[in-house]
Image (cartoon, rainbow, N blue to C red):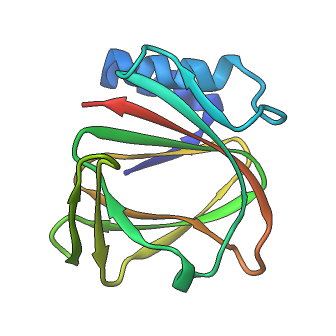
């Protein structure tokens, strides 16, 4: 997992060309008032999912990991907690869903607070729990860029 300010995005361009495309998209677009939906950056190889929702308590969220895509999760508006745990530290709760590119887990992990202008990168070995309230539920605009591995 990587967490950093979007102002430092260029430091991560060398990870791979699709990560660079994802971070460039986030840096070059004002996403604070963007309409929810999918935006293709490099087709299915790299695309953004713009989301607006209220954060939730942990009991209403789930631990997940992905096989085909890396998540670059960027908080454009608001504040959100995100959970993290290394692969192998939790028990699989549901088999892999090919349509969602998702495995659901159960267990315990660590939590970080992600504020406006910050992003987190979760690879296939990063079990994560997004959408968590930092205290009381609050409105968030988040962009999740799916980067094909």
Which residue is the extreme one toward the right? 33
Does 11 sit left or right of 97 as displayed?
right
Residue 48, given in percent of the width and then of the height, sits at: 54, 30
Which residue is the extreme one toward the front? 99
- Residue drawn at point x = 51 percent, y = 74 percent: 61
Which residue is the extreme one toward the left? 88
- Residue drawn at point x = 68 percent, y = 73 percent: 133
Residue 2, given in percent of the width and then of the height, sits at: 42, 47
- Residue drawn at point x = 84 percent, y = 34 percent: 33
Q: Compare residues 142 and 79 and report the one nearer the observer.
A: 142
Q: Compare residues 43 and 16 and report the one nearer the observer.
A: 43
Location of the C terminus (image quadrant): top left
Does 44 sit left or right of 4 as displayed?
left
Q: Compare residues 81 and 106 and report the one nearer the observer.
A: 106
Quarter residue 32 falls in? top right
Q: Compare residues 115 and 31 and report the one nearer the observer.
A: 31
Residue 100, given in percent of the width and then of the height, sits at: 35, 49
């Amino acid at each position: 997992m990587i967490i950093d300010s979007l102002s430092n995005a260029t430091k991560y361009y060398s990870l791979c060309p699709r990560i660079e495309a994802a971070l460039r998209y986030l840096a070059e677009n004002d996403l604070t008032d963007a309409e929810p939906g999918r935006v293709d950056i490099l087709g299915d190889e790299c695309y953004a999912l713009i989301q607006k929702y209220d954060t939730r308590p942990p009991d209403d969220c789930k631990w997940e990991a992905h096989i085909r895509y890396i998540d670059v999760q960027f908080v454009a508006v608001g504040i959100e907690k995100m959970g993290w745990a290394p692969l192998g530290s939790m028990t699989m709760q549901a088999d892999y869903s090919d349509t969602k590119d998702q495995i659901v887990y159960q267990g315990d992990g660590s939590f970080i607070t992600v504020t406006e202008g910050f992003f987190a990168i979760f690879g296939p070995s990063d079990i994560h729990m997004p959408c968590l309230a930092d205290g009381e539920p609050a409105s968030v605009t988040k962009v999740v860029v799916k980067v094909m591995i």
